[in-house]
Image: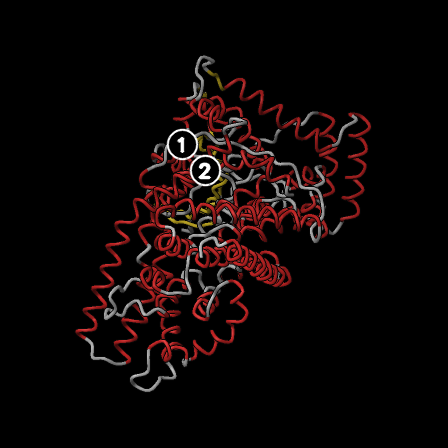
Amino acid sequence: MKPLRIALAGNPNCGKTTLFNKLTGSHQKVGNYAGVTVDTKEGRLMHKGREIAIFDLPGTYSLTAYSLDEIIARDFVLDEKPDLIINVLDATNLERNLFLCLQFQELGIPIVAALNIIDQAEAMGLTIDHRLLSRLFQIPIVRTVGAKGQGLEELLDAAVAVAESPIAAIPTPYGNELESVLTGIIEVLNTDLPFAASFPSRWMALKLLEKDADAAKKLSAHKNRSLVEASLAAGILTLERHSGRDAEILISEARYGFIHGAAKETVTRDRATVPLTERIDSVLLNRLLGLPLFLGILWLIFQATFTLGAFPQEWLDLLFGWMAERARTILEPGLLQSLFVDGILGGVGSVLSFVPLVILLFLFISLLEDTGYMARAAFVMDKFLHIFGLHGQSFLPMMLGFGCSVPAIMAARTLKSTKDRIVTVLVTPFMSCGAKLPVYILLAGTFFSSHAGAVVLSIYLIGVLLALGSSWVFRKTVLRGETTPFVMELPPYRMPTFRGVVWHVWDKSFQYFKKAGTVILAASVLIWAITTFPQSPEGTPPEQAMEASVAGWVGKALEPLVAPMGFDWKVAIATVTGFAAKETVVSTLGILYKVGDSTKQEASLQAALRNDPVFNPLVAYTLMLFTLILAPCFAAQATIRAELGTRWLVFYVLFSIMVSWTLCFGVYQMGTLLGIGV
C-alpha cells in the first residue's frame, strides 16, 4: 500500500512546525514569527500499520501568490496533489486562520483541521464549540496542543479515515450574483478536461476573478484561453456594474462574512479575562519604553554571555594547552608534530575554546525567538526601518542573521515586493552571524576585558546601522520605489519548551562543531602548510621563517592594502581566509602566532595578541569592524547567488569590500589622530 501523503499547512505562528516535529520526530526549526519554514520539509511515520508521509509547507495567510512562501505552498498542493491536507488552526486567532481553510476547501482536496493551541485559547477566556464548527465547515476538526503532544492520535485517526473515505468539499456560498458569474467561467474552463484535472475549475475561476497573476499565467495552457478570458471579462464587468466594487473585494467579503458568522456561533469569550499577552505588551510595546527595553535586553545578553562563559572558556584553553604539551612529549620533533600542535590544535583549538560563549548566545537568542519577543522587536523597529526604506518584515530575516546568514537570506522570500526582497538580502549579511562571534569574543576579551559585552554590543549595533544606511542608499539609487505596507501579526507569548530550547541550541552548536571538524580543520591544515613551506634552514628565527613561507609572501603582498587600517601581513592572511568561514580568522591567527607552542611562557592566543606590538585596542576594534562588514562566508554568498543571481552577488561583494575598507580606514586613522586605543 502506498504511503498516505499529507500536506501540513497553516498560518505562520499556528504551531504547525511544532506539530510536524511531534508527529514525525523531526527537529525542524520552530520560531515564533513568520518566515521560518521557507521550503517544504518531509517527515515519515507509522500509524496503526499505515505509513504516512507528512509535508510541512511554509506558513502562509492565503493562497494568493504574492510571496514565494505562498507560491511554494500553493504549487505543492496543485502539482503534488497530496491525499489530504491537515490545516492547522490557531485557536487563539480563529477567524484569521479560517480564511486559509476556506481557500483549501475551494481546491477540492480532503481536509482535516487541527484546532491547535487550544490550551492557550482557554487561558485567554475563549470557549470554542469545535463540533459545531466542524458541522458548519463540513470537515473533521480535532482539538490539539502540539507542544504537549495532545490530540495527535485523534488527529491521525481522523486523517486516515478521511483519506480512505473522502468527504466532498462544500463550496463557500458567494451569493446569487457572484455564483452566476462563477458558473459561466467554470463551464468554459471545463471545455479543456486535462486542464480542469490539473486545476480545479471553481478554484481557478475564483483566482481569475481575484486577478491572481499566477493563475493568469497558468491559464495560458488552456486550449480555449480566449473564450475563458472573454467570459472572465464579461463577468468582471457585470459584477462591477451591479455592485460598484471589484470582484476581489466581493469574494473576500463573502469569505469573511461566512467566517464571522461561524465564529459568532461557535466562539464565546469571558470578557473579564485580560490575556497575559496584552498585559506584557502594554510594557514591552510602550511607545517610549519599547526601543530602550529591546536594547537593554541585548546588552544583558552580551554581558551574561561573557560573564558566564569566561570560566569554561578558560578551562578549554587549559585543556588544549595540556594536549599540546602532551603531544610534544609523545611525537618526535618534525613536521607531524608541527602539523598536530601548530596546525590542528593551534587552529581548531582556538575556535573550539569559544564554544561555551557561542552556546550561551544561541541559548539566549532561542529563548527570545520561542517566547514571541522577536516578533515584538520587529514591531518596535517598524517605523524606524521605514525611514531607511526597509520593509518592517525585513527585520525578521535580519534578526535571523544573528544566527546564520544562510537561512536569514532565504527567509527574505516572505517579502512580497521584489525590491524589498533584494534590499533585505543585500543588507542582512551586515548582521553579526554566529560565525563572526568567535572573532569578537577573542578580540574584545583580549583588549576590552572589563567592557567586553558593551564592545561586542557596539559592533552588533554598527552592523544594524550599516544595514539601515545601505538600505537608504539602495532605495535612493539602484532600487528606487515605494516600500509596501507592513501588517504584522503579534503571536501570543508562549513558554519555551525545554526540549525545543535544547534542540535549537544543540542544532546550532552542532553546525559550529561540524564546521570546526570540516571547513576549519581543512583551512587550519592549509594555513599550517603555507606558513611552514618552503622550510627555512634550521636555526632561523621563527618570525623570519614565517615571513619566508608562502603565507609570508602573500601577506607581504597584501600588506600595503591593509596597512592604512593598522593591519600587518598576518592579519591580511587571516582576513583572506575569512572568506571561506569567519571562524577561520581565529584559527588562522592561532596558527600564525603558534599558540600551540608550549615552549612559550603563555601559550594562549589572547596572550600572544597582547604581546604583539602591532595589536592594540584600536587595531582590535578595527579588525572586528572589518570582519563584520566584509562579505560573508562562501555558503552565504552561494545563497545570495541562488536567491538574486550572479549580478547581484558581484555587486554585493564589491560593495562590502568598498564599505569595509573605507570605514575601517576612517576609524583607524581617526583613532590614531586622537590617540584613542593606541
Would you name the residue on which mark 2 appears? 32
Image height check: is 673 above or below 18?
below
Task: Give the amino acid at mark 2.
Answer: Asn
Q: Residue furthest bottom?
A: 537
Whole-percent x, y for residue 335 in the image: 28, 80
Quarter where residue 544 is shown: bottom left
In this rendered view, identify the residue nearer to me: 584 or 292.
Answer: 292
In this rendered view, identify the residue nearer to me: 477 or 376.
Answer: 477
Element under disc 2: loop
Task: Give the amino acid at mark 1.
Answer: Arg
Could one spot residue 197 in this view of the protein? no
Q: Residue at x 46, y 50 (%)?
A: 41
In the rendered structure, are the residues bearing label 1 and label 2 in contact, judged by CB atoms less than 8 Å apart? yes
Q: Which image quarter holds the C terminus?
A: bottom left
Could one spot residue 251 in this view of the protein? yes
Would you name the residue on which mark 1 appears? 494
